[in-house]
Amino acid sequence: MTMELEPRSSWSSSSSFSMSVASTAHEQFGDEEIDVLTAKLDEVNRNIDTTELENEIFSGWIAQNNTNSVQTVDARTNRGNRRKHGGTKGPTTLTVDQKYQISLNQLDEGQKAFQLKKKEDEKVMDSLKAVLQETEMRTEELKKDAYEFKRDIVVGAENMHTGKIMAEKVEKYMEEKLNSRDGLIEKLRLKNQSIRAQIQSIESQLKRKEEMGDMLHYIDFHQLQIENKQHATKLEERNEELFKLKQTTSATLTNLNNQKDNLNALMTQHEWLKAEIQSRTQLKKNAVKDIAGLTNQIDAGRRRKKQLVQQQAETNGMPQVDDYVSLKAELYELKDALRNWERKVEIVGMEAKRSRTLRRKANNSIKSSTTSKR
């Protein structure tokens, strides 16, 4: 095998030339001769493919190694050829052992390159897995935040009277979210510092062992793997506990906000009931005064009637027509006044009954809100 490498263009031109020769031979020779030539042509093509593969392997070996090694091989081969052929310099050839060694060398280099590429691909794959996991976690957090925002702000912060979202609740919601994110950032920062400290400690231990000449054995490496798995398990448990605490905290904050909203609604209702009770109390006082005045008027009318009856009994003769008419008119007026005052008394009684009902409901709502707070 010569070390001089032919360009591939010459190989392609030789194959095209062989094809042209085969087409010309088909016109000059018989079928049997053509089959023999075709078999020889196939063998030549296989030899060319083998030579191309060997040239690629040897070219890679020459590029990776120093050219002095090739010159040394050439010098040794030339000395042997000069002894055999009387000092004439022939082409440099490789023995089967040399080809075998070069092939093994190239195979080792290829395996090293493959392992290096495999490690790089594994690092890239781990990075992509971490990014994918982070993306999934972030997607879940965004879905949860969107659900909580819709529940607490879009629906929960809407004013029942105006239909608009209250800015105070939005501001409060954002402050709570920012505070929770700050707390999470602080926890992650402390966790990052702890992991960095562990890495530095392990690196310093490895460095000390390397300096002392005491490299890690298989048992030590296996022990580190076990400890790493234990720490990873503990870390997952802590992460699960942290996630559960975050969910519990979120539910507690939501419940607290709902209770605050209920308390504000009850306080508003309490103020309204208090004002209504004061108004009803004042109305009741006015009604009592009106009833007292009406009672006095009724008593006065009864006394007047009694006097008139006595006067009529004292008189022997029949009363005059004018007196009868005036008394009858006065009686009608007194009856109308009596009916009006009875209607007023009935209305005042209904208002007093309604005031007592409202007062009883207000006291019950205040007692229930006080009990829920406790």
Image (cartoon, rainbow, N blue to C red):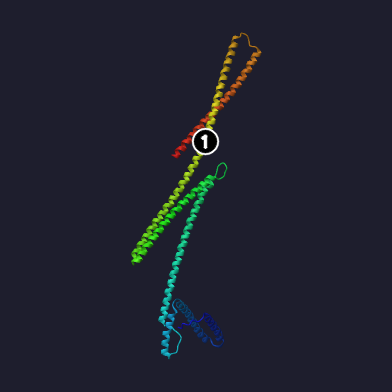
Residue 97: x and y in percent read 40, 81
Classify 342 as above or below 317: below
Q: Residue furthest bottom?
A: 86
| Circle 1 SS class | helix
- For badge 1, the amino acid type reads Glu
Residue 217 in sight from this viewpoint? no
Residue 362 in sight from this viewpoint? yes
Classify 86 as above or below 316: below
Residue at image mark 1: 271
Q: Residue at x 34, y 63 (%)?
A: 220
Q: Residue furthest top?
A: 316
Q: Residue at x 45, y 39 (%)?
A: 373
Foreground pick, 200 / 367: 200
Classify 285 as above or below 269: above
Quadrant housing the N terminus: bottom left
Foreground pick, 17 / 290: 290
Residue 30: x and y in percent read 54, 87
Q: How many marks?
A: 1
Residue 153: x and y in percent read 53, 47
Quadrant housing the C terminus: top left
> Which of the 4 quarters of the picture holds residue 96?
bottom left
Q: Residues within 10 Å of mark 1 (few under 14, many from 20)?
A: few
Classify 64 as above or below 244: below
Q: Residue at x 46, y 35 (%)?
A: 367
Foreground pick, 324 / 219: 219
